[in-house]
Image (cartoon, grey):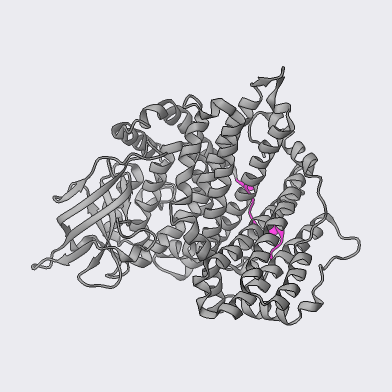
Amino acid sequence: MENRKILKSGEFLVDEVTCQDVFIPEEFNEEQLMIAQTCTDFLEAEVYPNVNQTDTGDRELMKQILKKAGELGLMGIAIPEEYGGFGQSFLTQMLVGEKIGAGYSFSVAFMAHTGIGTLPIMYYGNEDQRQKYVTKLASGELLGAYCLTEPGAGSDANSGKTNAKLSEDGKHYILNGQKMWITNAGFCDTQVVFAKIDRDRVLSAFIVESSMPGVVINPDEHKMGIKGSSTAQIFYNDVKVPVENLIGARGEGFRIALSILHMGRLKLGANVIGASKKAINDSVKYANERKQFGVLISTFGSIKHKLAEQVIRTFASESAVYRVSKDIDDLMVKYKVECQDKGRAAIDAISHYAVEAAILKVYGSEALDYVVDEAVQIHGGMGYSAEMSVDRSYRDSRINRIFEGTNEINRLLVVDTAMKRAMKGDFDLFGEGAKLYENMETITDGKTQGEGYFNEKYRYIRNFKKAILLIMHGASAHFGKSLISEQEVMNNMADMMMETYVSEATALRVQKLEGMKPDITMYKAILDVNIYDAADKIRKAGLDAVNSFATPELAVKLKKVIDLLTSTHGVNIKESRRLIANKLIEDNTYKF
């Protein structure tokens, strides 16, 4: 894969790669699989036996479990060796994120510490800050938190009121303000805090130690789910922060916050896969034990439908996660050659894939919500009982659509960021859309005689992309600069883009598996259902958008073309889903 083709963020809309250009999870090497197994073993040994106790809000116990993870080296996966870590690839970091994602509240505490609590200092800090803090965060000696959100500043992070003023002697910043929804607040040693210096328009970032006088941490909030995760408000009352604890340059905080959010979205995309697989395993094990009308409920068609759909959405999401993770890894290598500061090079590579980060976050969190909802349904009345683990899975899942920027914000980002990248000249989005628009009457479905299985699938995906380009061009022409305010239409386009990117990643993975497995019939069934359903969703979103901006005459033309471009061959989805479900039922665990 040395000379593989790598697309820029959002470029998938106008270009394509071959299956040899993508990484798939079946290609993880022995060392990566050993690290993954270590994570799974840790959950079994330390997290699951204590999950009821941590859910009571036992801060000390959660702190102890996190420190044990640090002793094992799990907190240093993303940290370079010179700062006490293992310097693993982004792919490996994402695999760890997936495995830890099955750990309920522990997953939230662990990911907050290793990600947003540590990496702003690693990526943007200077050498002294890295040596003083990152080395201890990597070992678990210190535990970290990230303090951005305020009562009046959620999605609009830059509207925060927390303020820093330089002391008269120039040695400290005097910090005053309030932060809320801070993960790990109850036991963190370090905090990455965002505040405006004097009357600055944008944020700056600081390293604050919880032991500094004037730092007041409230009791934990009572939450719907992730009850074992310490979440509290933090107040800063004339806190004297040494000037050397400013991260990066003055006014760079907003950029740091956005970059770290892109990273958080990507890692949440991996996290939810682990949570999905855990809920699927709980579902199939229960279905293989529970009898009704004298037979196991796993023999019922309705249950098989649910089990198969859980698998399809998880498999598709996983395909997209590792596709972009390899792209990020390769871009990191390139940037590190060009940039002396390896930390900045790493975060710049991650931030580049902002479109895909938002896609993974939204698609993955909504797939997990489906999976856990059906897990409860498969368990029937027992699913509503706190005795069963699916109760916790269901409640814990809900935060993921709010974390790291709400799904509503992220849907807007998917489209807006792709358009901005195109305007910067990264790829020709608008030119391609204009060409299609001008030649609308000549558009065909592109079908050729003797078309092979994968050629057919890629043709569908190319057609989905054409439908997106047509809608983007039409909406942009109609609304102009006010398009960003037409959030319903932006959502339509985002849904079309997400379904297309994930379907393409799934197709590339299944085609690559053809050269690795003797029989991929079952994987083709996953792809068949995925694309069949995606076509319907893309058509609906496309027509909804058309009806929002087109004149009656134009609407007739566009609807006809959208219908053509989202037309797919019929699929026996009953038999396809049964094939998938039967494998899951036979294995009694997720092995896809």
Report x, y in % for residue 364.
Answer: 56, 50
> Which residue ends up furthest to the top in the rendered image?
294
Q: Say if the magenta span includes residue 370.
A: no
- Give the camera-side residue of 459 and 497: 497
When the figure is inspected, residue 28 is found, relative to residue 502, above or below; the finding is above
Q: Magenta includes 22?
A: yes
**Residue 54 percent location from the top left of the image:** 36, 31
Q: Could one spot residue 428 in this view of the protein?
A: no
Residue nearest the viewer, comparing 300 with 359: 300
Q: Farthest residue toward the front?
A: 552
**Residue shown at 55%/49% (left/top)?**
366
Q: Is 85 displayed left or right of 473 in the figure?
A: left
Which quarter of the figure has residue 579? top right
Q: Residue at x 32, y 49 (%)?
A: 182
Quarter holding the C terminus is: top right
77 sits left or right of 173 in the view = right
Q: Can residue 140 be seen in this view?
A: yes
Image quarter (top left, top right, bottom left or bottom right) of the N terminus: bottom right
Residue 543 lies left or right of residue 86; in this view the side is right
